[in-house]
Image: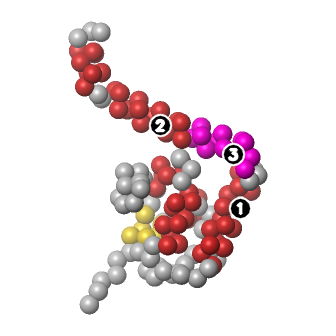
Amino acid sequence: MSVLLKRTMTLKSVIGFGSYPDLTVGQMIDTGKRYELLKMYYNLDRIDFSQEVKDILFITKEREIQKPGRNRTSQRNIFIHEIINDERAAIGIEKGSMQGRMNRVNTMAKHIAVKCHNNLQNSKISNLNRNQGR
């Protein structure tokens, strides 16, 4: 007897596996890793997203698949390419445009800067310097 569990992830849900175990779904969206989230949705049978996340990722009712259960047809590749094209059209980015690349780089740089700033504020050296008046 097997128990099928489905994990529905929201923007604040931590991924917890794979290449990005410490990132939340919202952080992955902010840093431009939407393609990885789409691959998770279409390739993993027990991972689902809330409707809010599906709206952000342009997963419409026609593109949703039955969960739990994996859709192993070629439709998932068509859906992923349609979604990527819809995102580019919504943002106004043509394929390979420099502005699109700069937007992704700027978003990633902001995320890294916030992470570094938070780590620096709480580091041992920073606390030592603050306590010693340096």
Residue linked to disc 1: 85
What residue is at 23 percent from the left and 15 percent from the top? 131
Instruction: Examine the structure image and report whether residue 55 is included in the region drawn in magenta.
Output: no
What residue is at 49 percent from the left and 39 percent from the top? 111
Q: Which residue lies most toward the top here?
A: 133
* Relative horizontal placement of residue 133, taking residue 112 as reference (left or right): left
Magenta segment boundaries in residue numbering:
96-107
Q: Whole-percent x and y of residue 121?
A: 34, 26
Q: Whole-percent x and y of residue 79?
A: 64, 72
Instruction: State the quadrant of the N terminus.
Output: bottom left
* Relative horizontal placement of residue 131, taking residue 58 as reference (left or right): left
Q: Nearer the viewer, residue 55 or 69?
A: 69
Residue linked to disc 3: 100
Q: Quadrant of residue 38?
A: bottom right
Amino acid tagged 3: Gly
Q: Whole-percent x and y of residue 117?
A: 41, 29
- Residue 112 is labelled as 2
Q: Does any portion of residue 12 appear in the rendered image?
A: no
